[in-house]
Image (tube, helix red, strand yellow):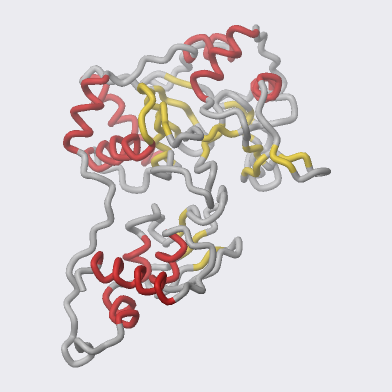
């Protein structure tokens, strides 16, 4: 870790462009860190309420630490990804992630270790691929190395009309502005011994302008073994005293699976049931479905509580008030998914 709040790295245009090509997937919008709480919001012109595009000048301000820290969305506008990030929030999980990096290195798979406030980020770069495949690849590695409690970015398989940007990570080598830090702090990339890859921001950028990619053969081999990202539900075991064939379909559905178990097939949740809401552009983990409470809730105001409500929103309907035909189609699909 290095405190470099007063540093002003020398940056030339060619280096800046190459760095941006490594980490930035889209230029039509960008997230800005709020130093009051460490969260992010999309940059807007607040006089017109219009989304602002990203520019190299803003990236340069981020790297120089000139009053702004921005994030990077990992999916482009076509829901393609060119990198994944394993995010460890404490020293114990970071040690597990570094162990995976060591093992992958022995297989000829390069990765890049970035320190963070409490743990670290591990970046893997590859040729652009669908976000769903990138997540299959990352989740396979996470399961292989038993990285429970380590987050994988991007958190979405694809962008939707309701969530048009997806998840983000802090754009590397800028200043982290968080209220728990006494001063804004710059976190750098390190080797397996936690020694900085280079002594200056400019030299770190030069290393990252053409990062080594995961070999195509390795990606293909993993994707052949990685399961498709489809929801899976076990066949429910009904209590014959409480259930009958004549029970209305909506009641069968609600009784067959808990909200938490259902939602967890679609949204990546923490052990306490928190996650990024799939129904709006969420950077704060506004979504909640506690394991011991049979409902879901979005603190940003997305409506709904039941399994059926969630699935209606997931299907893209703008309202929970469906007509008779739409309601029937939703119930039929849910009954099939739940083996009812």
Q: How far from the left and from the top, in percent, is residue 230?
A: 27, 51
Specify the quadrant of the image occupied by residue 153.
top left
| Residue located at (37% from left, 70% from top) | 259
Please count the marks in the image: 0
Instruction: Kindly identify the residue that appears in the image at 24 percent across and 17 percent down.
Output: 108
Residue 273: give x, y in percent of width and height: 42, 61
Residue sticking out furthest to the front: 325
Looking at the picture, does residue 251 appear above or below residue 152?
below
Q: Is 85 situated above or below 268? A: above
- Side of 110 where 225 appears, left or right: left
Tell whether 129 sits left or right of 275: left
Q: Is residue 169 left or right of residue 65?
A: left
**Where is residue 336 drawn, in percent x and y?**
23, 67
Q: Name the residue at 62% across, 32% down.
A: 28
Which of these two is toward me, 111 or 3? 111
Is 14 rendered above or below residue 238? above
Q: Residue at x 69, y 41 (%)?
A: 35
Residue nearest the observer in this picture, 3 or 267:
267
Q: Residue furthest right?
A: 47
Q: Quadrant of the N terminus?
A: top right
Name the spot of residue 248 as percent of width and height, x first: 30, 85
Comparing 163 with 181, the one in front is 163
Query: Quarter holding the C terminus?
Result: bottom left
**Whether residue 229 is visible:** yes
Residue 293 in view? no
The answer to which quarter of the image holds residue 255 is bottom left
**Is 136 above or below relative to 23?**
below
């Amino acid at each position: 870790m290095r405190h470099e709040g007063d540093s002003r790295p020398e940056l030339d245009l060619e280096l800046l462009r190459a760095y941006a090509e490594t980490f930035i997937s889209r230029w039509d919008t960008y997230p800005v860190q709020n130093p009051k709480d460490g969260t992010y919001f999309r940059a807007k012109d607040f006089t017109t309420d219009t989304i602002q595009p990203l520019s190299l000048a803003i990236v340069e301000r981020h790297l120089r630490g000139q009053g702004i820290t921005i994030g990077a969305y990992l999916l482009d506008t076509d829901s393609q990804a060119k990198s994944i990030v394993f995010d460890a929030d404490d020293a114990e999980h970071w040690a597990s992630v570094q162990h995976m990096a060591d093992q992958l290195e022995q297989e000829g798979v390069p990765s890049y270790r970035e320190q963070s406030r409490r743990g670290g980020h591990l970046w893997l770069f590859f040729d652009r691929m669908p976000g769903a495949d990138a997540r299959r690849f990352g989740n396979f590695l996470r399961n292989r190395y038993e990285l429970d409690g380590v987050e994988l970015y991007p958190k979405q398989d694809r962008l939707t009309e309701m969530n048009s940007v997806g998840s983000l990570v802090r754009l590397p080598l800028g200043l982290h502005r968080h209220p728990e830090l006494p001063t804004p702090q710059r976190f750098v990339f390190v080797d397996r011994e936690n020694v900085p890859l280079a002594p200056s921001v400019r030299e770190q950028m030069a290393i990252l302008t053409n990062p080594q990619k995961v070999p195509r053969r390795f990606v293909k081999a993993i994707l052949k073994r990685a399961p498709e990202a489809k929801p899976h539900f076990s066949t429910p075991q009904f209590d014959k005293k409480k259930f009958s064939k004549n029970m209305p379909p909506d009641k069968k559905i609600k009784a067959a699976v808990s909200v938490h178990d259902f939602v967890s097939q679609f949204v990546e949740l923490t052990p306490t049931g928190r996650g990024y809401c799939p129904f709006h552009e969420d950077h704060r983990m506004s979504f909640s479905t506690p394991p011991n409470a049979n409902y879901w809730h979005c603190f940003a105001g997305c409506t709904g509580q039941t399994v059926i409500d969630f699935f209606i929103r997931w299907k893209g309907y703008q309202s929970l008030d469906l007509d008779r035909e739409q309601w029937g189609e939703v119930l039929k699909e849910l009954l099939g998914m739940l083996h009812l």
